[in-house]
Image: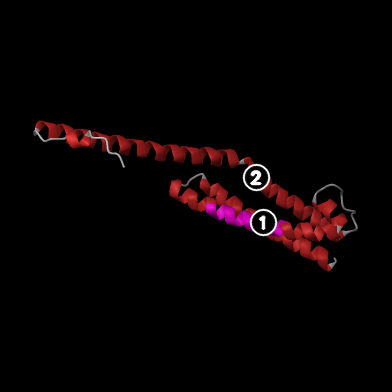
Amino acid sequence: MTNERAKLLQLLEEKKELFLEMEQVSEKMLLMDADELTQACSQRQKILDQVQEIDRVLKGMCQEDEEARLVMNHEVQPEAEDKALKALYEMSFAVKAVVNRIVREEEARRNHMEQQRDAIKYKIEELNQSGSSVARQYLQTAKMNGQDLSFLRKTRNF
């Protein structure tokens, strides 16, 4: 195996490990509340940034090795006797398998995040309603006590 192809294989292994880490974070997201979801999304973004850096390096290396690029993109089957290309093919296939598992569950994660968002929105609306009812009660109490509340009705111009 040439040094360049060994480096490609190493980068693909790193990419696979990053996606496996992302898969673990993503699976846990289905059980998280809103605060934890924010942290998990940040963690996933950091992982994706690392993957993008690896992809940038892979792309540069594959410009010099067209055969490796074709094999890694599954555009051609590697020859049986070329173990380096076969290893690249299998590792790139393993990376894509992990990515497919993540993508397949993305809709469930999105739904869970929307449910958490709606729950927070509902709590905020409840707090706002209870806050306005407190204000109404204050106004009614003040009116019953005969206090002058005309200052509340004045329009202020700045």
- The 10 Å Cα crowd at callout 1, few under 14, some 14 to 19, many 20 or more, is many
Question: Residue 60 at what x, y percent from top left?
Answer: 78, 59
Left or right of 14 on screen, residue 8:
right
Asked whether disc 2 touches disc 1, contact meaning CB atoms under 8 Å apart, the reply is: no
- Residue found 68% across the figure and 55% down from its top: 52
Could you tell me the amino acid type at mark 2? Arg
Question: Which mark is first along the chain, 1 or 2?
Answer: 1
Q: What element carries label 1?
A: helix
Where, quadrant-wise, is the C terminus in this rendering? top left
x then y, percent, for residue 123: 36, 39
Q: Which span of residues is magenta-colored?
A: 42-55
Give the alpha-carbon distance from disc 2 to disc 1, as whole Å: 16 Å
| Left or right: 137 in relation to 114 | left
- Residue placed farthest to the front in the image? 158
Residue at image point 72% right, 48% down: 96
Residue at the disc numbered 1: 51
Q: Does residue 59 sit above or below 147 in this rendering?
A: below
Q: Which residue is found at the position 82% from the left and 58% from the top? A: 62
**Of residues 43 and 102, the one drawn nearer to the viewer in this rendering:** 43
- Magenta part, dominant SS: helix
Query: In which quadrant will I find the N terminus?
Result: bottom right
User: Which residue occupies 76% across, 50% down?
Assistant: 93
Is 106 situated above or below 95?
above
Residue position marked by numbered label 2 in the rendering: 101
Among the 4 quarters of the image, the one containing residue 101:
top right
One can see residue 7 in this view: yes
Q: Is residue 33 visible?
A: no
